[in-house]
Image (cartoon, grey):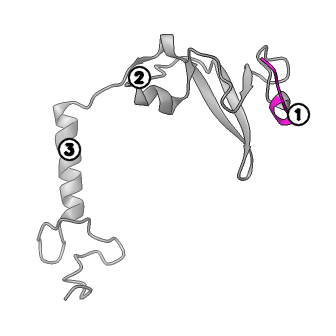
């Protein structure tokens, strides 16, 4: 693999000689490794495995890091139980219900007002 710039060379450490884990520059990670977001897009999760490598790049605020996990060791994403889904539904319904008039709205009640826009006088 040819490293074209000093920037990329600074972040290229596949043998972990300068960094605690193997390190690669942006868009240079080997096949078989993926970030959490990439795993989630495939319906997987790290499943408690250790970080296998990292990607470093210069971004807003300095050097940014993305940890990589082995795809072969990843586990399927967990799904919520029916009871968990029901609890989430109730919590979201409570966020849409006005405490003043008791009406369930199609939007979440603004915390700023603590009541629906009609009761707060913001809607005519």
Residue occupying image coordinates x 62% and y 29%: 67
The answer to whether residue 109 is magenta is no
Q: Dot 1 lies on which element?
A: helix
Q: Nearer the viewer, mark 2 or mark 3?
A: 2
Q: Nearer the viewer, mark 1 or mark 3?
A: 1
According to the picture, the residue beneath numbered tag 3 turns out to be 87
Q: Dot 3 lies on which element?
A: helix
According to the picture, the residue beneath numbered tag 2 turns out to be 44
According to the picture, the residue beneath numbered tag 1 turns out to be 6
| First in residue order: circle 1 vs circle 3 | 1
Q: Position of residue 13 (x, y in %)?
A: 80, 21
Q: Quadrant of residue 85?
A: top left
Q: Position of residue 120 (x, y in %)?
A: 25, 84
Residue occupying image coordinates x 72% and y 34%: 56
Residue occupying image coordinates x 28% and y 28%: 79
Do the CB atoms of the residues marked 2 and 3 lie less than 8 Å apart? Answer: no
Q: Position of residue 16 (x, y in %)?
A: 79, 17
Q: Quadrant of the N terminus?
A: top right
Q: What stretch of residues is rendered in magenta?
A: 1-8
Q: Nearer the viewer, mark 1 or mark 2?
A: 1
| First in residue order: circle 1 vs circle 2 | 1
Q: Which of 25 and 54 lies nearest the eye of the viewer?
A: 25
Judge whether 78 appears above or below 114 on screen.
above
Q: Quadrant of residue 23?
A: top right
The answer to whether residue 2 is magenta is yes
In this picture, residue 111 sits left or right of residue 60: left
| First in residue order: circle 2 vs circle 3 | 2
Q: Residues within 10 Å of mark 3 (few under 14, many from 20)?
A: few
């Amino acid at each position: 693999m040819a490293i074209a710039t000093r920037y990329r060379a600074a972040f290229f450490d596949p043998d972990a000689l300068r960094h605690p884990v193997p390190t690669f520059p942006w868009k240079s990670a080997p096949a078989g490794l993926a970030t959490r977001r990439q795993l989630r897009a495939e319906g997987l999760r790290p499943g408690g495995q250790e970080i296998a490598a990292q990607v470093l790049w210069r971004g807003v605020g300095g050097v940014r890091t993305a940890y990589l996990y082995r795809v072969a060791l990843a586990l399927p994403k967990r799904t919520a139980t029916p009871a968990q889904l029901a609890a989430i539904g109730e919590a979201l319904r409570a966020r849409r219900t006005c405490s003043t008039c008791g009406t369930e709205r199609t939007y979440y009640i603004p915390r700023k007002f603590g009541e629906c826009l009609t009761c707060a006088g913001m809607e005519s």
